[in-house]
Amino acid sequence: MNIKKITAMISAFCIVPSVCTGCGKSKSDKSYGLDAKKPTTVVIWHYYNGVQQEIFDNEIIEFNETVGREKGIVIEAYSKGSIDELSDSVLASIRQDAGSDEVPDMFTAYSETAYIADKLGSVVDLSDYFTEKELEEYVDGYIEEGRISADGGLKIFPTAKSTEVMMLNLTDWEKFADATNTSTDDLKTWESVVDTAEKYYEYTDNLTPDIENDGKAFFGRDSVANYMLVGAKQLGAEFVTQKNGKFTLNIDEKAVRRLWDNYYVPYVKGYFTAQSRFRSDDAKIGEIIALICSTTGSAYFPDSITIDDEYSYPIESLVMPVPNFEGTDPYLVQQGAGMVVTKSNQTSEYACTVFLKWFTEKERNVSFSVGSGYMPVMKDANDMEIIKSDESGTENSILIDALTVAVDEIKNYNLYTAKPFDNTAETRNFIGDYIQDTAQTSHDEAYERIHSGEDREKVLEEYVSDEAFNEWYNEFSAGLHDVSGL
Amino acid sequence: MEQDFNQPTKKIPKTQKMLTRLLIPMLILIVFQLVTFFSVLAIGGEFSFIKKYAYDTLIEKTRNRTSYVEKELCQKIPFVNEYASEINNIVREILEENNTDISQLKTDKELNRQIIEGSVDSIIYLLRRSLVNDVFIILETGDLYNNSNNIDSKAGMYLRDLDTSTDSGYKDLLMEMGYSSISKDFGIILDSGWKARMEADPQDMQNYDFYYKTIQNAQENNTMPIERLGYWSGFSSISHNSTGSMKYTVPLIADDGTVYGVLGIGLTEKTILVNLPPNDFVSESACYVLCNGMDNSDIFNIRMHSGTSFNRLIGSQDTLRPDQQLDENMYSFPLKSDIDAVGNIQVMNLYNSESIYAEEQWALISVAEKSDVLFLFSNLIKMMIISALISIAISIVVMAISCNNVAKPISAVIKTMNSKREYNEAIRFQSTKIYELDKLTDAITQLQIDVHSFSSQVSKMIRIADVGLCTFMYDSMDDSVFVAQSMLKLLNLSVKYQEDIVISRQLFLENIIAKETRQIITECLSEKLTDTETSFSKEYCIEKKESSNVWMRISVVCNSNKIIGVLQDITNIILERQRIEYERDYDGTTGLLNRHAYYHIVNDLFGQPEKLGIACIIMLDLDNLKYVNDTYGHDFGDDYIKTAANVLKEFKKYNGIVSRLSGDEFNVCLHGYSSKDEIWEVIHTVREKLINSYCLLSDGTHYKIRASAGIAWYPDDSTSLELLMKYADFAMYTIKHTTKGEITEFDMNAYAKDSVLITGVEEMNKIIDECRIRYAFHSIISARTGEVYGYEALMRPQSAILHSPAELLRIAKTGAKLYEIERLTWIEALRAFRKQRKMGNISEQAYIFVNTISNSVLEHPDIDIVEKENAGILSKIVMEITEGEEDNEAFNMRKLKRLEKWNAHLALDDFGTGYNSDYALIKLHPNIIKIDRSIISSCDKDMSRRTIIENIVKLARTKNIKVLAEGVETETELKTVIECGVDLLQGYFINRPVFEPQPITQEVVDKIMKYQI
């Protein structure tokens, strides 16, 4: 009997550990090894700043505390300050440049960066983690835009899209409009915007009769590159086109001239301007009263104007659709980075997709949109009723207005995004920077001369003449060929 | 042997299954071992060690995190101090350039702008070098920028970099506050809440504490080095829609001691949280809380927290306060959420000891759910318990299997033994493969063989003994019957079998020869079997046509599943018993029932009145038996008796039960008739025979049978057999003492008379108690006119036994109840009188004669009742006194006095019969003399009587006394007494006493008138 007892005891102690370890490993294949007890850390790099960053951080905290905690995912998000900084850091990490950080699990990127990263073989095809049905719930164009690789794999996941809107300091506009018999109808085409800007310059110049040529700029816009690229497309002269997987550069002089006439010329004349980093900053200090910015930028549009850092006054604002060139189809940029998941291991990749699904759920996506100014990416969520009903949106009426206009724009405009190729970013930057920088220089030179006493009309004519254009055009054309490598 | 078999049934020991017997000690052993195991662990302190280890893990983590945070924060301080002095230099230069002094800050806006613009580079360097989120410089500009709206505006600059890890020039900087020109020049984005100046809302001073507190304390201590004036403030934000930050602020102090502003850095929660990862704990339900508080207080203000568990654990609480110390450095925290939380407090040294803020304490507190901290500990205990339970379970299983290995063969043996087999078939056991068990089964087989041979020998012995015993045993389990060989002769099967057999019940029952036996055994076998042993026996008769009946007795014992039966031929016993019974019950001489048996039978009969109907008991006594005996000898006497008995046996034909009670006494009970006449007919028939029968005497003469008989009727005379026999006896003796040889019926009256004394006392008491006396009125009329003079009230007891007043009085006298009678007479007689008066049967003039008992006198309060009831008619009372005994003189005197009082009359009763009548006449002075009926009777024929009457009348006349003649029964007597001159008449000739008096008939009146002289 004693022997039996001993064997019983022995077998008992043998069974216990095996039973217990057995309990611990109740593994589900669907979780790709996620374990709430051993959380998987997912690092996200993004370029959000200010308001967007705060809202994004809050979303991440909420995720970590709820779904993340439940499934064993911890998201760590780092802002790289700007999209360029982000792109450089990501690509440097992927290329394992000296001093670069480890590759993040996920990063926000425009198609051009994603395109390069994909070419380096570091981007996960997300269609492996989403069913067709799930993808159908997203706006088709956004998903389509994410299929950048030749094999059609989904490489960029749309999280937050944006477009552009026109913002108006209504309080100051009304003073001007009343005095000059102008209406907002005069802001519908680029040509009329230029005319209105001229009127505004004259109007403000006349406010101080004792000082000559101190008129104020009416308008400025963020992302001049968008003006150029979308404008060219609208005018039927897309700079870079793709045919059978081959990219070609086309520079149409006529179209470029029209672009030049409606930005460079008024800029030089002082009707348009761009002084601070963003036009909303210019608006805040009363430098301009109309601007075009991304929907996300609308959050920065001021509710009061501070003049000379001294006195300030509250203003009303108006959001309007972006103007088009006279006699063209309406075109609008569709931008905003998506999320790119880098190749690591299944667990981390899956964890990223869990976050993406969570982040783009209708209500959350809407509340993020309303907070940040990004457009929702789900079909269902692109509905003003839902957007307006979001509780967090009641604080920021400018954003709601901007989104309202943007949703309308999306319905009525052709959306445009340049197809990425190897030098997309450089090309894009060049196109935007070149016209902006030359215009600024010319404007500064001209007005130095004007303020030194030369005749304004004559001086300005000099800078906007056909010769000036031709000179400008040649340099632009050559530079573009250079930068694009096409 | 027998004793051995009986033993187990007396005391059943508690039995347990083998498994139980083995299992319990084993379990006790295991439990004991486990207890030892756990006790050793507990005593050895292993448990508390593990617990302490769990706490230490938490403490260690908290300590490490604290040191990270502390380092992170403290390492910023030197940068701030360094740049503060650089700013001082810049300011000094600018002041020199402008040839002005620091006090101009409060008046010169341009100076402020110059200082801020001049500081931009340094400040941005400070931001980049110290890796902080915020950097700011704020100048103490006094009221320079203040408007009327109560808001305190200060010039300055506040820059923010949300992500410290990247350095993108100015691109990732946000300007929260500052000159727009700087924003323009440096390309710094204006944050959405941008303001040109710090605008401190007085209603929201909490957010501006970093500025005002630093300034104020610096002003008070402006000689101190700024290292001692640096201030860590909690999270605050200078614009309503930007994230708060934890700030370190140092004052900017000019050489002259003027505090002209502050320089500071800020860290957002996110930056600090880098050092406090949310999932730092084994379990999820824990968080870090960054707090500050005062040195001397244990209340900590919550400034920041990490981890998802914060909301669940602490929620909306603003402060934390440790409750009790659990272990070194471990505290429990009372929380609003009621979660049992523990934690460790690690103080951070953000200030050096010289700082004026040294008493402000910053601490990192880890708060965790206690159960989670002790998860390992509780898990370990859980595991140990599970192991213990599993080892117990396995032990049970193993032991159960082992026991089963032993128990199974035993069960198989038991099953084999219980299995059905032929009666004389030997049990064949399979080998159990267990040595001891096989030995046991061999022994059992041997035992079975021995028992079988023993039992068949016993059976044989019974058969040889031929005591008429047959046995069988029914087994309900397999519905079979064991039939002993001795029984076989009762069955049809006897031919086939020569030994004991076991057959099915049906076969057994079908083959029983005698139908009575079959029926009774069938009944026996259908008895319901219970656990308790029952037994019974029955006797029955097998009627046989060709020979005398056979009597059998069956005795059956039933227990839970067996019925054992024994059949016995008891014919001889029964016959013997019948003979004894006969001798006991019958008279040897006559063959009639003796007294004992007769009484027994008839008494049974009296228990069934429906059978009895009309019945009678006849007591018959032979006349002259003594004579016959004496004259002819006893043999002839016996013949005489036998002859009479033979005749009396005739009664048997008529539903009679005849018995010889003794010598010459017979008793017959005739019953079941519907009328007396039918019975009489029978009696007469038999009597006829009896009269005509005779016995031949030795002298050759025919001696006639003569007998006297008394009859008592059921139910007329009584329903009791004893009484009826007594009555019949009485009647018989009555007739025997008068005319022998007759039959007479019982006469209750005669009987009552004789027996009244015996029964009378009781009856008298009943009469008195229940007032069962009525009074009849006997008319007394005038001998002159025939008119009614009065009535004598005559007592009439209402009783079946005591009819006559004389008897009642006789008994009352012996029973000392005379007074009761006297009282009843006075009250009831007068009541009856009044009633009749009221009814008009008695005229108002009539007197009422009441007989008083001489030896008794009415007492109070009865006198009062009489007087009260009869008020008004007291004078109509005539009290009759019997002059009987001598010593009633005193009573009489009292009675006389009362009469006097009532003005009533006195009558002297029974006059002429007493021995001293004359004396009484003199003594009592009666109003009326009643001449006794013995004198009146036949006075018409007897001259002497007439003379006496005439003398009495003469005497009475002299005394003015009325004379009443009692008992006048004939017309001649009437004539005589009238002629004698009596005044009043009473007697049957006139009328009889009745309860309701009637008028005197005219005929009587006419006769009285006719004889008037």
Image (spheres, rainbow, N blue to C red):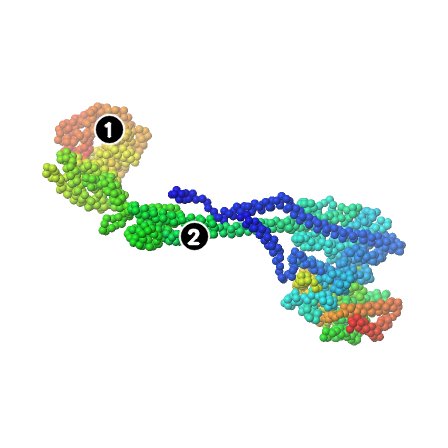
Determine which residue is flagged by label 1: B881
**Looking at the picture, how far across and down is residue A262, in whole percent?**
79, 72
Q: Look at the picture and state if B731 lies above or below B209.
A: above
Residue B741 can be seen, yes or no: no
Report whether B588 appears left or right of A182.
left
Q: Which residue type does callout 1 highlight? A: Ile
Q: Which mark is residue B206?
A: none
Looking at the image, tell me whether mark 1 or mark 2 is earlier in sequence order.
2
Q: Secondary structure at mark 1?
A: strand
User: Residue A439 occupies which quadrant of the picture?
Assistant: bottom right
Write down the residue under mark 2. Answer: B429
Q: Give the quarter of the figure containing the C terminus of chain A.
A: bottom right
Residue B830, position in %: x, y?
27, 34
Pick the residue in front: B158 or B659.
B659
Evaluate whether residue B394 shows in this view: yes
Q: Quadrant of residue B1002?
A: top left
